[in-house]
Each structure stands twice: as structure tokens, then as C-alpha cells.
Image: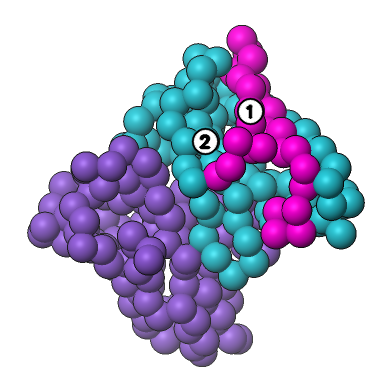
Amino acid sequence: ETGVTQSPTHLIKTRGQQVTLRCSSQSGHNTVSWYQQALGQGPQFIFQYYREEENGRGNFPPRFSGLQFPNYSSELNVNALELDDSALYLCASSLARGPTYEQYFGPGTRLTVT
Amino acid sequence: TQLLEQSPQFLSIQEGENLTVYCNSSSVFSSLQWYRQEPGEGPVLLVTVVTGGEVKKLKRLTFQFGDARKDSSLHITAAQPGDTGLYLCAGAPTNAGKSTFGDGTTLTVKP
């Protein structure tokens, strides 16, 4: 059984640029959620994808967007990067959508915006 | 305002000591999850509690879900340096539908 993988592991971007982060879900999982974790805080929910459609969104602006592909892998895109976007971005996969599910996280992508 | 409040924020103890960390809310949750996260890594699921009053044990870790399903605790017996990490609780309130995390308790166990 393959776990959740994310790429790249680290990324440095300049303010105003765009970034794409990638996630492969755990084998058999059809739901992917993305989180932003700032230093010293818990993960903040960005959005969730179930069967290629967005299924819930947190308090993040539209410049945060995503995709889920037929193989359930996913991308997180962030446009017009701001300094405050610097954080660890986590992807989590699960077997089902909805609030009461166990999530399995990838190692994260550390994004630094300068 | 955090929906899930975790306390204490930081805890530093000696190897062999016991400890309890808490996860509290004014909202009712259908379930709560506990995760452990090490620096530079993603959270790892430890346990899910579902029923009010439920107690689950994982070796030296004991998890309890409050009777009203608004709070949970994690007790570690005879802590070891390998228990060091950030302990996070997470769940979705029954009237909201979005999963939320607390800000965690950072535990340091000194040898």
C-alpha cells in the first residue's frame, strides 16, 4: 500500500509569482484535502476534493484553487503569492468525504515566499 | 477564535513522568481524531474517538472522549523521548461539516 506523497518538498518563490503543488493520494482513497500550516499553528483547511469536484472550502481567497484528477491525485495552485503564504502545505487523503473521516497526511511542501 | 482549544500549548517533562493534554470546545463533535506531528513532517493519525465517554488505549497512550462529545483528553504514561512531538486534535462539529484542527500541544520529553 502506497502512502500519500507530495512534491516538491521545498520551494522558494517570489511575491506575485504562481505556484503548483502536487499530491498523490493513498492507494484506494478517493478524497483529498489540502491544509496550510503556519509555524506554531495547527493545519488550516483550504479545500477538499471528492471525485474531481470541490467538496467544501475554508476561509481562503479565490487565488487558492485546486484540481483532482481521475486517478484521485490532486494539485493546489496559488496565484499572486504573498509573503503570508509562506507555510507548510499538507495534503491528506481519505476513503470518504464529509466531516467524520480519518485522514492520512503526506510529508508536506514547505513554501517560502520572499 | 479557535473552535478546538488545546492545552497546555507547551509541555516539557522528564522521561518516565505521566502527562495529560486536553482538547476542548463549546461545540459538539461527531468524532475527534488525535494526531502526532514531528518537525518537517505531516501529522500521523493516532486514534479516532466516536462515542461519548469512549476510552481507547494505544500502548502507553489513553484517549478519552467526553460524555457530551465536546472535549477529549490524551494521557501518556511513563513518557519516553520518542513521544516528543506536536499533538493535534481534529474533528468536525455536527452543525458545520468542515474539519478543524486545534493548534496543538508541543511535548518535549527529556532523557
At label 2, which amino acid type do we have?
A: Phe
Q: Which residues are magenta?
A: A60-85
At label 1, which amino acid type do we have?
A: Gly
Magenta segment: does it hold A67? yes
Shade of chain A as shown in the rendered figure: cyan
Q: Position of residue B6 (x, y in %)?
A: 38, 70
Task: Report the label total.
Answer: 2
Q: Position of residue B16 (x, y in %)?
A: 45, 84
- Above-or-below relation of B102 to B12: above
Gap between marks 2 and 1, in whole Å? Answer: 8 Å
Magenta segment: does it hold B111? no
**Callout 2 touching callout 1 (CB < 8 Å):** yes
Q: Position of residue B38 (x, y in %)?
A: 62, 62
Q: Residue A72: name its quadrant.
A: top right
- Report the disc number at residue A66: 1
Determine the chain carrying the residue at label 1.
A
Residue appearing at x 51%, y 60% in the figure: A42
Residue appearing at x 63%, y 22% in the figure: A67
- Report the disc number at residue A20: none
- Report the disc number at residue A47: 2
Which of the chains is purple?
B
